[in-house]
């Protein structure tokens, strides 16, 4: 069976080097936005922008509190995501983990209210995230299965063998017959993240993942490429990390041996707009390839991720254009060339 790897992150994974994460082969990420009606994750903005710049498909998630008014929770989440002027590609996620002392019929009713509010706001049916036993104990009706309407929602199931073996599948809760995402480890280690991270797979091919997200894989004239002149000490791995692509993608584009002075074709990872157009808010909508290089002077509070989104390009592309070794270190007054 085909699967696609991805991760989910929150405050506990702050300081992520997104091009390096993309270079490990991750294709999607779910990012914590809010919890209850009182908490907004302080790393959401940087993670949202950084993941897009590295070319990952993104979805935002909300940690649900069953003892808090669901409409207030939905508003907190909707306002947080909409403040980014970019709703992402994947559907929003309702994270069901705690009962907060509430009876299951109340949990079910309140969850449905949140789901309805968020679907109305973004036009996509959200994903339900939970574990097998929570769904069986706190999200089931008299017959032992979920409410009838729940089967219309994609299921993201948490179940931890901690190692994914090709062809393996999680055990489904009673009454559920299909999973869309599987969080199979909470102890993953990835290049670019200095803490344990949750590892996931999508149940399908890469093409099916993009279709599920309502996005397109760039091909043909829209596919962005750069060239890299090989320097002494370069390896396929170091070049892949610098540009935010996998070693396999780089080698596939350059089957020759790596020799100093050679020019490599680099299939730079790019953020993929939704089917209905680019939601980034960038002016110009991506002009022709003959547009001359631009410059930008770094201001206080700028990050390379935010600058990349502003100019509809990638962190890796700006870093390569300006010979930036550490994408988290730019200085006020620095003049950047924008490819």
Image: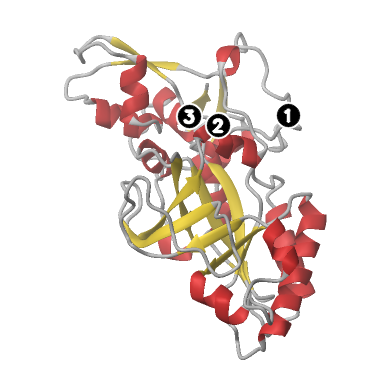
Looking at the image, residue 85 lies above or below residue 149: above
**Mark carried by residue 207:** 2
Can the viewer see residue 98? no
Q: Nearer the viewer, residue 149 or 290?
A: 149
Instruction: Specify few, some or many for label 1: CA neighbours under 10 Å numbering under 14, 14-19, or 20 or more.
Output: few
Q: Secondary structure at mark 1?
A: loop
Image quadrant occupied by the N terminus: top left
Q: Which residue is mark 1?
A: 283
Q: Residue furthest right?
A: 120
Looking at the picture, how far across and down is residue 128, in whole percent?
Answer: 62, 62
Q: Which residue is mark 3?
A: 269
Looking at the image, residue 136 lies above or below residue 75: below
Residue at 55% x, 40% y is: 52
Q: Quadrant location of residue 150?
A: bottom right
Query: Of label 3 and label 2, which has the lower sequence position?
Result: 2
Q: Secondary structure at mark 2?
A: helix
């Amino acid at each position: 069976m085909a699967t696609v790897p991805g991760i989910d992150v929150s405050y506990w994974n702050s300081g992520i080097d997104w091009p390096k994460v993309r270079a490990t082969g991750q294709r999607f990420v779910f990012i914590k936005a809010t919890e209850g009606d009182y908490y907004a994750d302080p790393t959401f903005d940087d993670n949202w922008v950084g993941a897009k710049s590295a070319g990952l498909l993104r979805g935002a998630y909300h940690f649900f509190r069953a003892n808090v008014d669901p409409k207030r929770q939905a508003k907190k989440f909707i306002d947080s995501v909409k403040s980014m002027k970019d709703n992402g590609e994947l559907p929003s996620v309702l994270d069901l983990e705690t009962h907060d002392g509430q009876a299951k019929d109340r949990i079910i009713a309140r969850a449905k209210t949140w789901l309805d509010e968020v679907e109305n706001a973004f036009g996509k049916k959200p994903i339900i995230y939970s574990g097998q036993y929570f769904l069986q104990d706190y999200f089931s009706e008299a017959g032992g299965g979920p409410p009838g309407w729940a089967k219309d929602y994609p299921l993201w199931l948490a179940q931890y063998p901690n190692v994914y073996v090709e062809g393996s599948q999680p055990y489904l809760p009673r009454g559920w017959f299909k999973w869309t995402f599987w969080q199979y480890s909470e102890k993953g280690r990835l290049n670019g993240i200095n803490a344990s991270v949750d590892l996931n797979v999508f149940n399908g091919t890469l093409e099916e993942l993009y279709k599920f997200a309502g996005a397109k894989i760039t091909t043909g004239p829209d596919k962005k490429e750069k060239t890299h002149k090989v320097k002494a000490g370069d390896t396929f791995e170091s070049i892949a990390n610098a540009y935010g692509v996998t070693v396999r993608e780089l080698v596939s584009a350059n089957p020759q041996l790596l020799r100093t002075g050679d020019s490599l074709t680099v299939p730079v990872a790019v953020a993929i707009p939704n089917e209905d157009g680019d939601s980034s808010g960038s002016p110009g909508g991506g002009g022709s390839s003959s547009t001359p290089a631009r410059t930008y002077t770094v201001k206080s509070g700028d990050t390379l991720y935010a600058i990349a989104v502003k100019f509809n390009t990638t962190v890796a592309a700006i870093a390569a254009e300006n010979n930036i070794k550490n994408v988290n270190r730019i200085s006020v007054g620095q003049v950047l060339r924008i490819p």
